Image (spheres, rainbow, N blue to C red):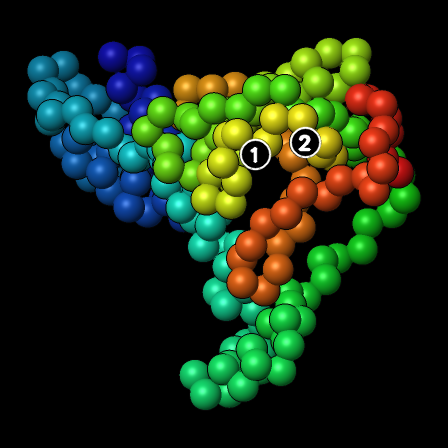
Amino acid sequence: FSALNITAYLAEAIEPFLPETAHNIREMLRIDAMFKGFLDGHEIGEAKLLFTKVEDEEVEKQMEKLAKPESSAPLSLQGTKSEASSRVESGPLSLQRPFKDNINFDDFMKMDIRVGTITEAEKVKKADKLLQLTVDLGSETRTIVSGIAEHYSTEDLIGKQVTVLCNLEPRKLKGVMSQGMILMAEDSNGKLMFVSPEAGFENGAEVR
C-alpha cells in the first residue's frame, strides 16, 4: 500500500521530465493527475515495463554510427552528395571530424596508458564485430573486448604490441568483462589500425 502511494506520487514528480512515463504509471495504477492517495479496495491495472533495456548489441550499433565520418562530420562539411564526393576525392582529411574540447593537463594525467602484447584472441559469441583479446601488460594479464573483427583475424593478432587505456571503467560486453580499451587510429574510410610503438617495448611501459 505504501509502495503504491509512493509510486503514484513519483509519477507527479517526474511528469515535467518524463511525461510519457508518468502517464504510463498512472495508467497502470488507474489514477488521474488529481490523485490524493489510494482508498481501500482500489484495483490497479496490469503491471508493464516502463523502460526497455538497452542491450549491448544496440549500444555497439549506435557507437558504430557515431564513428562513421560521414555521420559525424560537421554540417559545413556535409553539403550535397556531389559536394561531399568532391571533398572525398580531394583527400582523406576532407571529412576529418572536428577536435574535441580542450582538457587540462591534470585530466590527461588521469589516463593510464600502457604498452601491452596480445597473447590470445578469439571471436565473441553472437557478435560479428567483437574479439576477446588477452593482453599481457607486464605486471598482469587482462581480457579486453575490441570491435576489430572486421579489420583483423584472430591469427594476425597474436604477438601484436598495442597501447591500452588501462584505467577505463570495466564493462561487460556480450557477457565478457572488458578490462580496458585498445587504442586505434581510424582513417576517413573507417579502417582501423593499432597505435603501437615503432620498436618493441617492454610490456607495461607507460605512454605519456
Residue 127, by quadrant, is top left
Mark 2 packing: few (<14 Cα in 10 Å), some, or many (20+)? some
Q: Check if mark 1's residue and mark 2's residue have beta carbons within 8 Å.
A: yes
**Rendered position, 127 above or below 102:** above
Q: CA distance from mark 1 to mark 2?
A: 8 Å
**Label 2: element kind:** loop
Which one is in front, 35 or 199?
Answer: 199
| Residue at image location 65% in from the left, 35% down from the top | 182
Q: Which residue is mark 2?
A: 160
Q: Which residue is mark 1?
A: 156
**Rendered position, 83 above or below 167:** below
Q: Position of residue 72 (x, y in %)?
A: 54, 64
**Label 1: element kind:** helix
Residue 136 appears in view = yes
Q: Is residue 55 left or right of residue 40?
A: right
The three-letter amino acid code for the residue at tag 2 is Lys
**Rendered position, 1 above or below 27:** above
